[in-house]
Amino acid sequence: MASNHTTILADNITLINDLLADLLPDACNPRAMTLAVDLEGIDLCRHGKISLVQIMSSVSEVVWLVDVTTLGSQAFDHVDPYGRTLRMILEDTGIKKVFYDVRNDADALYNLYGVNLMGVYDLQLLELAVRHSLRRQTRLLNGLSKSIKSYLTPPVEWEPVKEAGSRLFKPEFGGSYSVFEERPLDPRIVAYCAQDVTLLFALEETLRRSFGRFGSNWEDRIVAGSALRVSLAKGAYEGKGRHMALAPVL
């Protein structure tokens, strides 16, 4: 599986305009595309900070790293010449947004910037459904890295990029999550943030192929489960602890 994309750090209004044009091209029906989305930050939840929003369209080769540290609320609320905002895209029920474990991302977006995510499809729940269909262990959730290794053949650079980035922010390696707030961004962090988003489309496709053989009717449950995860942001929610690894009942 080759990696062929361009990464752009959107850290000014001109680039936010470019981002919006790329995500909502005039010639494309927004309902016909999918967005892959991920977030990075410090203690990513309602009590922390969003540093970056990584987002890529299924009809583009560009991975956008939206610099929330630099732009603040403008990242979501800047209105381009055509009346579009990133908030509008994230809150549009008709534009599908693929996440892998949306819970803390949704909590941070809603409570820090008032962004009410809609149209979310959580691949962590699709992966769980695949294991249900295969009658494998389903007590625990799988993380993104494990799913990528289990279902895909990632590019040869994927593992080294993952390790290099992780060592910069994971405390067990002597790193700090504050690296996501440092400007200019370390190139290793840029590469780390971009690469997983580029694999979400392939991961969904592969999971769907595995899932489809069993003719199960789980799709509605996955959609409902994704929406339930997003709704946790509006109530009491604790985004850390062993409970986060426990699989929900779909």
Image (cartoon, rainbow, N blue to C red):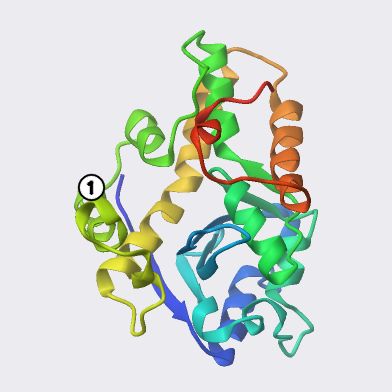
Q: Is residue 66 above or below residue 70?
A: above
Q: In what quadrant of the picture does the C terminus appear?
A: top right
Residue 116, image x, y percentages: 76, 60
Residue 21, image x, y percentages: 63, 78
Report if residue 42 is visible in the image: yes
Residue 54, image x, y percentages: 50, 64
Q: In what quadrant of the picture does the N terminus appear?
A: top left
Q: Looking at the image, which is closer to me, 112 or 119?
A: 112
Q: Is residue 47 above or below residue 68?
A: above
Residue 98, image x, y percentages: 60, 48
Q: Is residue 179 above or below residue 10?
A: above
Secondary element at tag 1: helix
Report if residue 34 is visible in the image: no
| Residue picked out by circle 1 | 159
Residue placed at 65% from the left, 84% from the top? 74
Residue placed at 25% from the left, 62% from the top? 175
How many marks are shown on the rendered structure? 1
Q: Is residue 119 left or right of residue 71?
A: right
Q: Would you identify the image quadrant in which residue 31 lies?
A: bottom right
Q: Is residue 111 left or right of residue 15?
A: right
Q: Crowdedness of circle 1 by 10 Å Cα count: few (<14), some, many (20+)?
A: few
Badge 1 amino acid: Glu
Q: Is residue 62 left or right of residue 120?
A: left
Q: Would you identify the image quadrant in which residue 8 lies?
A: bottom left
Q: Looking at the image, which is closer to me, 101 or 135?
A: 101
Q: Is residue 30 left or right of residue 151?
A: right
